[in-house]
Image (cartoon, rainbow, N blue to C red):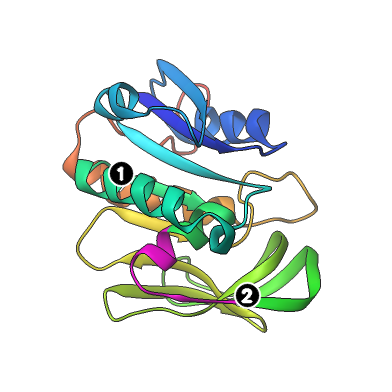
């Protein structure tokens, strides 16, 4: 399985790589490339595309993000957006972002639908929140500040406002990444989720 990570200057690249190798079978490559580079060849080779969090601001780089997300979505490859990556995906489809008065940092409580079967704690670090999403996106989890997780109703596109890769306390965000892998694996022989009892799981 080939994983392509689009890097928005995140400090969490090693943690993203660890999350992928912990949750996915037969990862043959994890490739990282900065947002402003050419992505065509690596998109074609990827089985899964991850858009990282980082230091960019979606509203200050609308053209860059719109062109990039359009290219990714049109590839029809499974896409998983983290924090800033989720914001870029959400706004591409017509969601509204809001700047928060205070930065969200640390473990927060979220209310989930039946995706993971219960409410959870996740690790967040962000100044902006997804306030509302269009009809094409299904909300999977919310918090006091906004939408915390969503997926597209027809496309293999998911986004989470929090950091599933972070090893902070009882961060349960990884369960949303597991759910994403489980869903997109139904349409790809190359994508499989590790489960307890698997060698290396």
Residue drawn where x is 47% and y is 65% of the image: 116
Q: Is residue 29 magenta?
A: no
Q: Nearer the viewer, residue 172 or 11?
A: 11
Task: Say if the magenta span includes residue 96.
Answer: yes
Q: Residues within 10 Å of mark 1 (few under 14, many from 20)?
A: many
Residue 113 in the image, given as x and y percentages of width and height: 45, 77
Secondary-structure class at tag 2: strand
In the rendered image, which residue does mark 2 sit on? Answer: 110
Quarter of the rendering occupied by the N terminus: top left
Nearer-N-terminus badge (2/1): 1
For the residues labelled 2 and 1, the Cα–Cα distance comes to 28 Å
- Above or below residue 170? Residue 33 is above
Residue situated in front as seen by the camera: 39 or 24: 39
Q: Position of residue 47 (x, y in %)?
A: 30, 31
Secondary element at image label 1 = helix
Which residue is depicted at the point 68% across and 37% down? 12
Q: Is residue 36 above or below residue 170?
A: above
CB-based contact (under 8 Å), mark 2 and mark 1? no
* Residue in the picture at 47% in, 58% down: 62
Residue matched to label 1: 72
Where does the image place residue 162, in percent across and percent down from the top left? 62, 59
The boundaries of the magenta stretch are 89-98
């Amino acid at each position: 399985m080939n994983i392509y990570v689009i890097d928005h200057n995140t400090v969490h690249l090693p943690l993203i790589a660890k999350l992928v190798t912990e949750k996915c079978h037969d990862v043959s490559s994890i490739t990282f490339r900065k947002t402003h580079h050419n992505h065509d060849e690596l998109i074609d080779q990827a089985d899964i595309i991850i858009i990282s969090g980082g230091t960019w601001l979606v509203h200050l780089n609308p053209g860059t993000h719109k062109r990039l997300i359009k290219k990714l979505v049109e590839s029809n490859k499974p896409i998983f957006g983290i924090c800033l990556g989720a914001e870029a995906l959400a706004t591409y489809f017509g969601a509204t972002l809001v700047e928060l008065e205070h930065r969200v940092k640390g473990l927060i409580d979220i209310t989930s639908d039946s995706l993971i079967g219960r409410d959870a704690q996740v690790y967040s670090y962000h100044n902006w929140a997804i306030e509302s999403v269009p009809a094409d996106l299904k909300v999977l989890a919310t918090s006091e500040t906004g939408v915390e997780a969503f997926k597209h109703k027809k496309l293999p596109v998911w986004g989470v406002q929090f950091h599933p890769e972070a090893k902070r306390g009882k961060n349960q965000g990884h369960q949303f990444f597991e759910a994403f892998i489980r869903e997109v694996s139904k349409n790809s022989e190359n994508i499989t989720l590790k489960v307890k009892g698997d060698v290396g799981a």
